[in-house]
Image (cartoon, coloured by chain):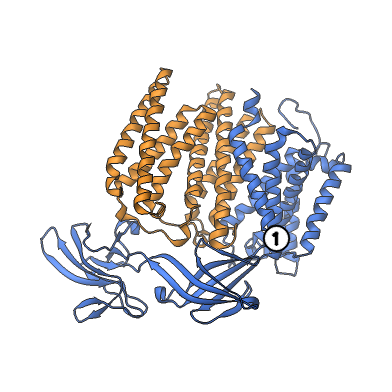
Amino acid sequence: MTWIDFPLYGSIIGILWIIGLLFLVISYKKQAVLKIANLLFITGWAVLLLFVIKLWLELDRPPMRTLGETRLWYATFLPLIGFVTYIRWKYKWFLAYSIGMATMFLAINYLNPETYSKTLMPALQSPWFIPHVLVYLFSYAVLAASSIVAIKGWYDSYKQKFNIETLKLADNLVYIGFAFLTLGLLFGALWAKEAWGHYWTWDPKEVWAFLTWMGYLIYIHYRNFHIHKTKQALTILAMAFVVLLVCWFGVNYLPVANTSVHTYTNY
Amino acid sequence: MSDDNFKIQRNLWENPWGYVESFFIGFGLIITGLFLEVFSSSKNAFTISYPYNVFFLVGYMLLLFMLFKWFSNTQLIRWLTKVPASISSIALVTFMVMIMGIIPQVTSQNNLINNLGLNHITSNWAFLLILFQFLTCLGLISIKRILQFKWSNFGFILNHVGLFLTLIAGILGTGDLQRLSLNVYEGKPNWIATDLNGQEVELPFAFYLKDFLIDEYNPKLALVDNKTGSISHNDGKNLYLVEKGETYYFHNFEVKINEFFPNSGRFGKRYEPVNEIGSPPSASISVKNTKTDSVQNAWISSGSFRYPYESFKISEDYSVVMTIPEVKKFSSDIDILTKEGERISTILEVNKPYKYKGWKIYQLSYDEKMGKWSNLSVLELVKDPWLPLIYTGIFMMIAGAIYMFWMGNKITKNN
């Protein structure tokens, strides 16, 4: 079992998941269909797990060294996080979101065969790499969703038909996203201690990650104590997302960028 | 708490203090701090080390307890345990950190930045003062919830006490943190390290480097623009690894790699594998222009510190070059020698530090000019006695985050 078999396995998984997603959409009209969707997701996931295990046995080392292998782990764990979140919070679209992202990573692997990107600098070769990036990935996705909800909230209040349920949904997403954001930040600190000798060095990416964390912290505290000031809460949420975007993409363009250890050109 | 429901006309500084007063105090602290930066003569960072940081920690905790126990009815303490003080201090700490995220933290050409100390925020008085208010709020509110002895406060306490411990131990621990670097050459024991200020430090044990090893990836193939000299393919990302037998395509050129030697030397018109210091990698390539069907053969090499590189000009506009191989892994096979005559063997590698007598020993670097022929290994030794406290805080916050994910927020739950 090597990467040569990946197109076959990848396509099977992709097809199962895409059909599953279609059933999930239908299940909004007909609830019973959701079971079929779940079955397809789980079957696809089992096939993926089989591929990962066989690849691992074949390589005789954890498949964690190349970028393609890293993406394979994202694709493996995203549905798992999606399922746990779904079981707890019952957002169906959440499941779709994580399966969709996982499918995307499989597609990237399919389109970029292994020969393209095999190199990974020594500091990145760590068991922390995947959990650190994975929880951030998920957190950003959830927080992005909360911002979409915030935009809806703005639009609704502009139209004078704001519903408090919108903000409650945003709250819940922020809580889930913030929990993962905290995990990502702390996993990063623990990893940094192993790799660079210190858990926190105020590297520009760390600074902006901290700012993102603080931004959502303000939102959470504000919402907790000023339940009825919805407009202000929505504004804070929007600003926090801007900080998140700076952290994600913008840091490389700031005057502080050249001192960062996080400016890898390719992920 | 000031909510929309009861908007009462009140004057500034009238009880209870709200957001205006909170930001007033916060900005007051920041301005005081900036004045201190401008007028204080000492340019050294403010740090306290053992035992004074322990005294400070114990004293601070006792003070917080006493303030909460006996003075919680005073204006100041009531304000500090309420939301406006928390939110304003979170916002102002965020503001100060944002400055750090924008202004590079090195000596600036702008005198205003230098004088206000905006290029060393972490030791800036303004930042320290506002952080102190933040910590005081966090500490008092933690004490308040702990003393309520309620299970429903479980997640709250994990998150707040965790953050408090991590921050306070991180700040106070700076004074006791030792980071030394040590150069060790193959075959020569060394016990003299240097600290961050370039001072020599004698260690009670020595390091002996038996072997320094580097694994490299194969070099990569790149298409270079002859005029600009820059890589003109895939933006320099995801270049092709040079491997024997592979064929790659650039524009209308088909590049086939006939032969690859990781260590080689030039003999007349071709390269042959050799094993000597500084022998660079090389490859024999055939380039076919698919428009004209003409084929050219050449040898290319990335060169090394001893030999020049060789590229191949395939047209007026482009050349094919071999990049310098990237490092896959580097490690040091070392012995630690103690004064008692003990000899401990271990292998140091990036991401795999070794613990010895309260020190963590890291593989830091090597002679980068020499690359894989380096006989120098740079080690880093770190001693951070406050780490257990910081890790306690971090793991509390991890548990708190999981709790938070599972429980959600109280607003949603109450409805």
- Residue B128 locus on image (x, y percent): 72, 56
Query: Which residue is nearer to you in this view: A48 or A183?
Result: A48
Residue A154 in the figure: left or right of residue B282 = right
Q: Colour of chain B?
A: blue
Q: Is residue B19 visible?
A: no
For chain A, give the colour.
Answer: orange
Quarter in which the N terminus of chain B is drawn: top right
Q: Answer with the quarter of the image where residue A201 lies.
A: bottom right
Q: What residue do we see at 61% from left, 41% from top?
A: B401
Q: Is residue A181 left or right of residue B37?
A: left
Residue at which label 1 appears: B173
Q: Nearer the viewer, residue B94 or A139?
A: A139
Above or below — where is B14 with respect to A58? above
Quadrant containing the C terminus of chain B is: top right
* On screen, residue A41 above or below B265: above
- Residue A136 in view of the camera: yes
Q: Is residue B6 above or below residue B233?
A: above
